Image (cartoon, helix red, strand yellow):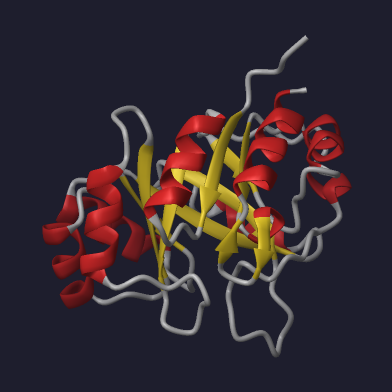
Amino acid sequence: MEREVSIKICGLKTQSDVAAVASAGAAYCGFVFFAKSPRNLSIPAARELALAAPVGLAKVGLVVNADNSFLDALTEEVPLDMLQLHGQETSERVIEVKARYGLPVMKAVGVGDRSDLHALDSYLKVADQILVDAKPPKDAALPGGNGLSFDWRLIAGRRWPIPWMLAGGLTPENVSEAIAMTGATQIDVSTGVESEPGVKSAGLIKAFVAAAAG
């Protein structure tokens, strides 16, 4: 029996990536705007990909501590459906971004141990969605996309009043277990469907979505 699970494939860089994600049946595609990431896109490149995305595939822009000048340029050029804040943005910043751009905001929160769940709670009244990700190592150059998972038992049985998405180290091999353990109905993946950093595999994307669906 198939599960009702919505999948987000993040870090797309080519039109063939977008086509593979749509063909596999994912609900969201993610574009990364962070210079240190191997998945980083320029605004013009992202615009082309967003315009190529089929109707019904939600387009998410991932930014890290972005200022208004960058977000102004991004939202003016790229037809996004959601902004994903993946840095140290405060609750106040989430409110400001939502008000300024009129787009739903997903706030990413890194989880390493139980104490990190308290930080997550502070965004529940201001964000539209929460991305529960693995906390990056202290010396990591990237705030996400490190291919690391966290102890899923920390959120087993947890429910939040807004939609949430599970991320961090997910692969076609472990996503079914992650869903069973956490009860997640939305899943985010980037490195787990790549043949090398920043290069998506259509075969892995298809396998991941199929495994998540049970």
Residue 113's spot in the image, x, y percent?
A: 81, 63
The residue depicted at 37 percent of the width and 38 percent of the height is 58
Quarter of the image that includes the C terminus: top right
The residue depicted at 54 percent of the width and 47 percent of the height is 9
Is residue 9 something one can see in this rendering?
yes
Residue 64: which quarter of the image?
A: bottom left
Residue 153's spot in the image, x, y percent?
A: 88, 46
The residue depicted at 67 percent of the width and 53 percent of the height is 193
The residue depicted at 69 percent of the width and 46 percent of the height is 204
User: Is residue 160 or residue 35 the one in the foreground?
Assistant: 35
Answer with left or right where residue 11 lies relative to residue 2: left
Vertical comparison of 87 with 80: above or below: below
Answer with left or right where residue 96 lies relative to residue 77: right
Residue lying farthest top? 1
Vertical comparison of 32 with 154: above or below: below
Answer with left or right where residue 170 lies relative to residue 95: right
Is residue 125 something one can see in this rendering?
no
Residue 155's spot in the image, x, y percent?
A: 78, 44
Quarter of the image that includes the N terminus: top right
Residue 32's spot in the image, x, y percent?
A: 42, 65
User: Is residue 183 or residue 196 the one in the foreground?
Assistant: 196
Residue 136: which quarter of the image?
A: bottom right
